Amino acid sequence: MLTIHPPPARLNEDMVQRKFGFIWPNALIRLFCATLISPMCLLGKGQTGCDMPWEPPAQEIGLECGQSISYAPIVPEHTPIKVIRIAIHSFQNDDGSGNFRVDNTEHMDYLTGVESSSNSRLADLGALNIGNTPFIGDSRVQIELVAVYEHRNTAVINVPNANQQYQTYVINDASNYGLTSFDKHEVEHILLPGSNGPGNCCSGRVSVRGEQGWLLASGWYAHYLANGQSSYNWSIPGHFVHELGHAMNLQHNYIGQAGVCDSCQDNDAIPGGPCPSQGTSNNYMDVRLDLPGAVNGYNANTPDPGFSECQLGRVHHALEGNAGTIWRTVVQDHCTYDPTATI
């Protein structure tokens, strides 16, 4: 359960760890990993340990699946769940109006509802309607909301320049939360513009594909105002999973601007052929326009969205430190060795 206190509203890493119970001495865990099972010091959610940042191997940012496809969770239980830390930044008017507030129980329930619903989607994927890929029903990725911050400045309530607002309110800590280097650089920061406008949802983008930084998610508060407390599991989680896909090093799977799309052939209608047209696939990296009242909706039922083997291979390849810096956000919480498991 996320504990929220009015400004500053945040959970430090120790508090997050203690939600899972016993904390192993870090020195003992690191010695155990290094001497006994270093090659299999994998990621998962459970007891704590192995929590110091590690030096990733040489980065490989290429678009082709290459060796990254071997990281796909074909047999889900052979791939430990990777938990990504996220922090939400609520941009408000000077008087605290215009966006989610930490002292409003309904608002916080809504945000934790988005967290829960997004995790349900990530753990229950649908079979793709376009492509030739093995069905993978669980992404083996989850998110954990570790902090909610308020930033009261009417001039930037709509986050007109995400790079600038990230630099000001995260890196430079303009709201004086006492952010540590860990808080800034080992968490994915979700920037929520405030709005009292139409309830359409959603739009967004990330700072740099595959890199730790910011994820801009517009329309959440307007959607809440227009549709009520229970609407957290409508369009928002599907769109959030899409944007999280970009943060985890995925491109769109469809033919977009200037004909650019990903090179995962297993989500093409014809292997090696052109990418699908926009809105024709139920791939999370497509942008569906068919949900009533939504700008970028994701159809939750007919059929359920999913990812291809190549896409999930890329995701886990990046989260294990082989591409970009998104690996910094992954909880390092226990070492495990299973001689029957392969990745």
Image: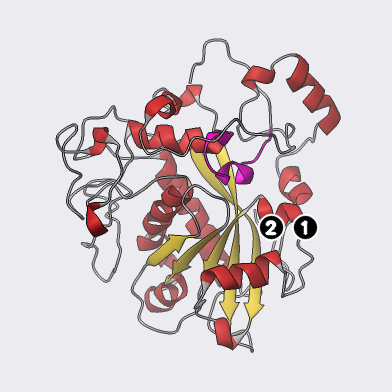
Judging by the rendered image, the residue that carries numbered circle 1 is: 180
Residues at marks 1 and 2 touching, judged by CB atoms closer than 8 Å: yes
Q: Position of residue 179 (x, y in %)?
A: 75, 62
Residue 247 among magenta residues? no
Q: What secondary structure is marked by label 1?
A: loop
Q: Does residue 40 show up?
A: yes
Q: Is residue 66 left or right of residue 163?
A: left
Judging by the rendered image, the residue that carries numbered circle 2 is: 184
| Three-letter code, disc 1 | Thr
Q: Is residue 116 left or right of residue 174?
A: left
User: Colour scheme of this structure image?
Assistant: secondary structure
Q: Does residue 149 show up?
A: no
Q: Position of residue 64 (x, y in %)?
A: 35, 34
Q: Is residue 270 above or below residue 170?
A: above
Residue at 22% across, 53% down: 259
Q: Is residue 170 left or right of residue 70?
A: right
Give the magenta part as a residue range.
321-333
- How would you rate the neighbour count of disc 1 (Cα within 10 Å): few for under 14, some for 14-19, many for 20 or more? few
Q: Quadrant of residue 170?
A: bottom right
| Three-letter code, disc 2 | Lys
